[in-house]
Image (tube, rainbow, N blue to C red):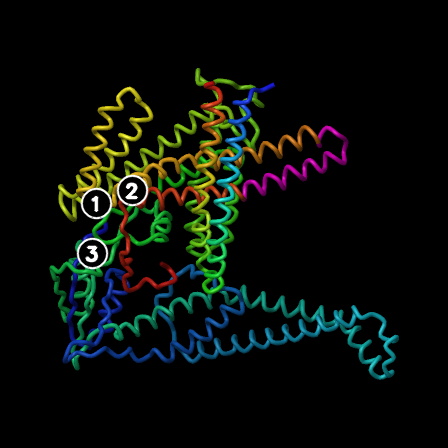
Amino acid sequence: MLKPKKMNKVLIVGSKDVLESTINTLYDLRIIHIIDYQGAEEGFEIGKPIKKTSLFSEYVLSLRALKDVLNLSDKSADREMKDFEFSKEFRERLDHLENEVMKKRKKLEDIQILLSDIEKIDDVGELKKLGLSEDVNSIMLDLINSKENLIKEKQELEDELKHINEEYRNFIVTAEDFLSREIEKAETPLRLATTENTFVIEGWMPSDNIEHAREELQKSTGDKVHVVELDEVEDGMPTYVETPKPFKPFDTLVDMFSTPNYDEISPTLLIAFTFPLFYGFMLGDFGYGLSLFGLVHILRRRMHTPGWQSLLNMMAYVSYFTMFFGLFYGEFFGAEIYHVLGIDNIAGLHLPIAHRLEEIVPLLAASVGIGVLHITAGYIIGFVNVYRTEGLKHAVLEKVSWIGILYCIIGFLLLPDYIIPLGAALVVFSVMMMLGEGMIGLLEIFTLISHLVSYTRLLAVGLSSVGIALAINKIAFDLLLPNGIFYAILGVLLLVMGHTLNLALGIIASFLHSLRLQYVEFFTKFYKGGGIKFTPLGIRNEEV
Amino acid sequence: MADLTTGLIALSAALAVGLTGFASAIAERQIGSAAVGAMAEKEELFGKALLLTVIPETIVIFGLAVALILLFVVLPGL
């Protein structure tokens, strides 16, 4: 789950008459990351595409144009087409549809241009004053009078296009999807090495799946394909981390920084916890959390692209944490929720557990404390990574030493009485660290301190948001609402707009600062990245 | 009347936030203009550009931390 899956290089060798069924099987299995053949070996040449491609490409071009004109580009096929009738009928249907849509589209554009011209004439006003001849005048007037008709015609065209959109949407999207896949399959031989009668597919496969792939291939080709497993370790091994589905969206955050390389632990699972935690700690308002939750659910129905869906899934987690911290701080749109409700403890627990404006110092300490834990986690992952690649000695010198330095610094702050033993320990750890990373590492100690202070943003970003919310509430409730109906309307307006603005700011600021803490403070402790993402044959680029 | 020490502490807190705010602004100005330039070439860089632009915000957060410590730790301790 944390470690990238073990990969093996495989060679799939077979005779050319089963090439197509081999590719089909591999495509459906989504299992092999093909290494493109560069054409460097003697006796092998790059394969030729399977015949039907050119016809398919033509269809796909038409379908994509239609998709574009009808605004379907963000729709994905809701069912997969398994097979397809390439009858004459299909072609005629497509041609007819394309003609129809393009013609209507053109007409619509013409009308629009005409309408905007008429608008201009309208603006100029009384034509008679210009002293044009009678003929021109009457033509102009006719034109202006035709405006109503044009608008009606425009409406009709738009309705027709909408009708076509609804009727053929499914057909267009599924056909385009299917044909694009077929084209990709047909072009796969261009990535392979072939001789006159045989082909060789070279690629990476997760070791656990090789047996399964072999069986499937032999079944579909009637034992005419041979799968060879190589025990090679080399550069360019793709990384495939099997993140459990609920945490998948957080893969995007890691990949945005850099894909993990083959030898290191993927931080996705940890980030799936710390990112929403930090976010909630900063935004921390029950009202805002609830609004965010609502917003996510509205957008989920509207935005269907994979990118949006994964962002929204992530924001759903975030909203739970925001609501939790809202209860923790006792804030509801900036108001003190427990105070308003008149509750001050539940089961002996004083509420709110921490008031952000009154308990600044404890919360400041808590922020840095979270930082210490987060950074320690970073060094521990770093330790495991170095241990696995370079051995225990390096791991201790490079990572354990840093953990020691970190806790010595914390020790100076918390236990000023033990300054001498702590100082001695610091010297020991620093020497260890310099053995591991060189003299330059000494400068990094200051970076470490600045990283620790940097975690105070967990409180600071939140404080600014509370401040704005409080100011809005104060102006609205104390100054505007009690002073007559006019000011009351103004007050309500201020409440709605002010909190919307503050929520927008809070969503963006918390997101960026939470992410920054991961990238700058956390990743620098262990993360190398620079890996190649495992993209098996059968997953199209848009889906990644 | 507050005494001179209180005044100086308040002033220091103000300076800490104000001046670091300037520093952040100067740094973000440069990153911001570069980011807009990059986005003009390649629009999908928006996410990364936004993230890079807020990196120097750390400076003002340091200032804020100093101010908070001055006001809520140093001042009550006097």
Q: Are marks 3 and 2 on the same chain?
A: yes
The residue carrying mark 3 is A206
The residue carrying mark 1 is A437
Pinpoint the chain carrying mark 3. A
The residue carrying mark 2 is A444
Question: Element under label 1?
Answer: helix
Q: Are marks 1 and 3 on the same chain?
A: yes
Q: For the residues marked 1 and 2, what is the alpha-carbon distance in whole angstroms? A: 10 Å
Q: Badge 2, how many Cα within 10 Å: few under 14, some, many 20+?
A: few
Mark 1 or mark 3: which is in front? 1
Is disc 3 in contact with disc 2, using a CB cutoff of under 8 Å?
Answer: no
Instruction: Give the magenta range.
Output: A480-504
Q: Position of residue B21 (x, y in %)?
A: 51, 41
Nearest the camera: A297 or A365?
Answer: A365
Res A283 visible: no
Q: Residue at x 30, y 80 (%)?
A: A51
Is disc 1 in contact with disc 3, using a CB cutoff of under 8 Å?
Answer: no
Image quadrant containing the C terminus of chain A: bottom left
Q: Position of residue A4 (x, y in %)?
A: 23, 50
Res A435 visible: yes
Disc sitting over residue A169 in the figure: none
Instruction: Looking at the image, tell me whether mark 1 or mark 2 is earlier in sequence order.
Output: 1
Picture quadrant where residue A418 is located:
top left
Q: Residue at x 31, y 45 (%)?
A: A523
Question: Element under label 3?
Answer: strand
